Image (tube, rainbow, N blue to C red):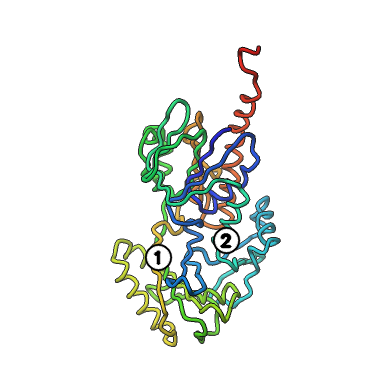
Amino acid sequence: MARVLVVGAGLTGAAGAALLRGAARGQVTVWDKARGAGGCGGGRARRHDPRERGSADLGAQFVTCEPELAGPRLSFYEELLSHGILKPLTAPVEGMVAREGSCNYVASQGISSVVKYYLEQSGAEVSYEQHVTHLSLRDGRWEVSRKAGPPEEFDVVILTMPVPQILQLQGDIVNIINESQKQQLESVSYSSRYALGLFYEAGTGIAVPWAAQYITDNPCIRFISIDNKKRNIESPEAGPSVVVHTTVTFGSEHLDSDPAEVQQIILSHLQRIVPSLPKPSSIKCQKWRYSQVTRAVPNCPGQMILHTQPLLICGGDGFTRSNFDGCIQSAMSLAEAVKPHLQQFQSQAAKPPLDLL
């Protein structure tokens, strides 16, 4: 069987792997350098004390569907809704600007549950803490090296990590990317920001009239959410959690600052915005270096083929746009490009050996 490696267990990689399930003679493996699924959109933080229940979304906060733009991708929203993974957003969000006809959804078990659903559907072998460093050609296959563990060989490699990380890969890939492709990839840009998760003991009350709020007059904070209230999962067994997202400007200015100092700055601004907020039992500070795509690869179908035989292809929100719909569009485009290559393995396997002809 053809061995297919998907690098990146974010939404594009997971959905792409699911779309390849059942493809002719394809065995899919997913590697991600993080400790769990989700990518930048599905970042999730848990309480420091494992005896306490509860977690918070530090990445994407909502999934927005615009039916007139979704087209063939509308079925993906419907499937997640039918399985109870997505639910309509009903909690009050101050300052949210919604387009007419659009629908906003939340994932009650966190945005990462969407990614985990697709990974389960894929039937792929998923491994975390696998940091890919080199891609080299070896006898018609890709030899993929990582920081820990021996190199492995694959017939097809799909790269779905942020574009700057694709450009950091070493090995034959450096010379395989042509000048035009390199210029297009280097043109992709991302915003950066910090996210803060504040966790409280069970029974703690947070007296605000909203579940989430967009802030427009603060140089540091752009968004605040009572995360469990936003996801409509208030429980007496789990304490509340608060999520704070900074502005892009603040994120860029403090990108390489000491995280402990950044955390204190964010907390001081939060105290001024919500002075009644109680002291949390624990705090998680997350830096998103590649938060959202501000400029994607221009005029792109959602993927870019870097090498044909053996196939090396890349995709993700850097080739579309930074939302659920953009990631699904890229996943569909990747699967459409990869399937013909897997069918070639089927036709080759169907040929009788030469000594039987």
In depth, the one of 265 and 83 nearer the eye is: 83
Q: Find residue 133 and report its horizontal and vertical position in percent.
A: 37, 43
**What quarter of the picture does the C terminus occupy?**
top right
- Is 312 positioned to the left or the right of 85 in the image? left
Q: Which mark is residue 286?
A: 1
Task: Point out residue 353 in the picture as x, y percentages from the top left corner.
Answer: 62, 17
Looking at the image, residue 235 lies above or below residue 107: below
- Residue depicted at x 59% and y 55%: 325
Residue 125 versus residue 278: which sits nearer the camera? 125
* Mark 1 residue element: strand
Real-space Cα distance between discs 2 and 1?
Answer: 19 Å
Image: 302 above or below 141: below
Q: Position of residue 289 (x, y in %)?
A: 39, 58
Tag 2: residue type? Ser
Q: Quadrant of residue 210?
A: bottom right
> Which residue lies at the image location 58% right of the left edge and 79% below the top edge?
235
Q: Is residue 151 above or below residue 322?
A: above
Q: Tag 1: residue type? A: Gln
Residue drawn at point x = 64 percent, y = 35 percent: 24
Q: To which residue does mark 2 refer? A: 113
Q: Nearer the viewer, residue 40 or 56?
A: 56
Instruction: Work out whether residue 228 can be spotted.
Output: yes
Residue beneath the point at 42% across and 80% down: 280
Q: Earlier in the sequence, mark 2 or mark 1?
A: 2
Task: Find the residue positioned furthest to the front.
Answer: 51
